Image: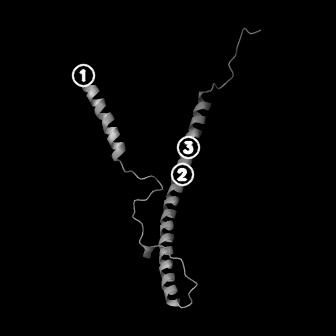
Amino acid sequence: MLVNILIIFFIFLIIYQIFSVKMDYTLEGMTSDTTPQPSSQQYQPYDTNNSNNVMILAQQNAGNIQVLKQQVDSVLGLNRQVQDLSGNLSSLAEQVYNMVQAQQQLAQSSLPSSTPVITGTS
């Protein structure tokens, strides 16, 4: 009876894993779940061949400045995360150093204080 229940349980787990792999939409590290930005929020190349489009170039320049500002702001947000990770890394390095020192002290304390006298070797 118990064996039958375990067999059914493991079959259920295997089926669940198969469905969870097929239905799971996890995002990888470099993928994005955001929709593509509309063309007004993307950098627009300049048309310098037409000399009559001075106002268009000025408006396009303003739009490109906004896009670049948004990109710089997103990089500044990453800077805070990098600083946080750097602080965590230095804290972990200090903890590892302290653990190594404790292990060395333990090893030194477990050594005998004097050299043992060995007899009967001559």
Looking at the picture, tell me which residue is in the foreground, 106 or 59.
Answer: 59
How far apart marks 1 and 2 lie (CA) works out to 49 Å
Residue depth check, mark 3 versus mark 1: number of the one nearer the observer: 1
Q: How many numbered circles does the render carry?
A: 3
Amino acid type, callout 3: Val
Among the two numbered marks 3 and 1 on one chain, the one whose residue lies closer to the N terminus: 1
Viewer-side label of 1, 2 = 1
Instruction: State the residue position of label 2.
Output: 89
Q: Which residue is identified by label 1?
A: 2
Quadrant placement of the C terminus = top right
Up/down of 9 relative to 79, above or below: above
Distance Cα–Cα, label 3 vs label 1: 47 Å
Mark 2 lies on a secondary structure that is helix
**Spot occupied by residue 113 in the image (x, y as percentages of width and height):** 65, 26
User: Which numbered mark, 2 or 3, is in the foreground of this view?
Assistant: 2
The kind of residue on which mark 1 rests is Leu
Instruction: Looking at this view, name the residue that lies furthest to the front.
Output: 49
Q: Quadrant of residue 11?
A: top left
- Figure check: 90 above or below 7: below
Picture quarter with the N terminus:
top left
